[in-house]
Amino acid sequence: MNAITALEFQRNLGKYTREAHRQPVEITNHGRRDLVLVSAEYFDWLTATAQRTHKTADGSALMLEALQHSNMSPEHDHLNEELA
């Protein structure tokens, strides 16, 4: 990802909007990350990806039952100690 200053972005708006169609462009303000310019297509993909995230409780009854009866691999038994 290319990082540029806000002033650089203002001076070369066309260049960086074209670049944002290929990859995100990080815009800094006073040396700090401020904005990230992305194409509309990439933004839509990010939004759709975020909406596909579901809670386990929203799953089907069959899936929840399968999870309740599942077992971890013995190689992860040490994690049980952390729960105690």
Image: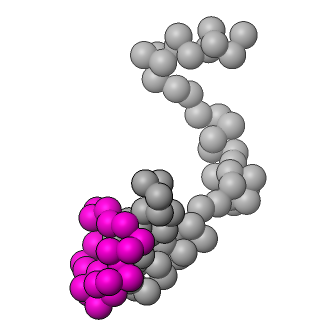
Is residue 1 visible in the rendered image? The answer is yes
Query: Percent position (x, y) of residue 77?
Result: 52, 13
Q: Residue at x 62, y 44 (%)?
A: 66
Q: In this view, does 76 lie to the left or right of 65?
A: left
Using the image, determine if residue 63 lies above or below residue 8: above
Q: Which residue is drawn at 56% across and 67% down?
A: 50
- The image's colouring method is one colour
- Marks counted in the figure total 0
Q: Give the range drawn in magenta.
A: 1-24
Is residue 33 visible in the rendered image? The answer is no
Residue 22 on the magenta span: yes
Query: Percent position (x, y) of residue 23?
Result: 28, 72
Q: Which residue is drawn at 56% across and 16% down?
A: 79
Q: Which of 60 and 6 is in front in this view?
A: 6
Q: In this view, does 49 lie to the left or right of 65?
A: left
- Image quadrant holding the N terminus, namely bottom left
Query: Percent position (x, y) of residue 38?
Result: 40, 77
* Among the 4 quarters of the image, the one containing residue 7: bottom left
Q: Residue at x 24, y 85 (%)?
A: 15
Using the image, determine if residue 75 lies above or below residue 13: above
Query: Percent position (x, y) of residue 41?
Result: 40, 85
- Image quadrant holding the C terminus, namely top right
* Among the 4 quarters of the image, the one containing residue 31: bottom left
Q: Nearer the viewer, residue 70 or 47?
A: 47
Q: Nearer the viewer, residue 2 or 63?
A: 2
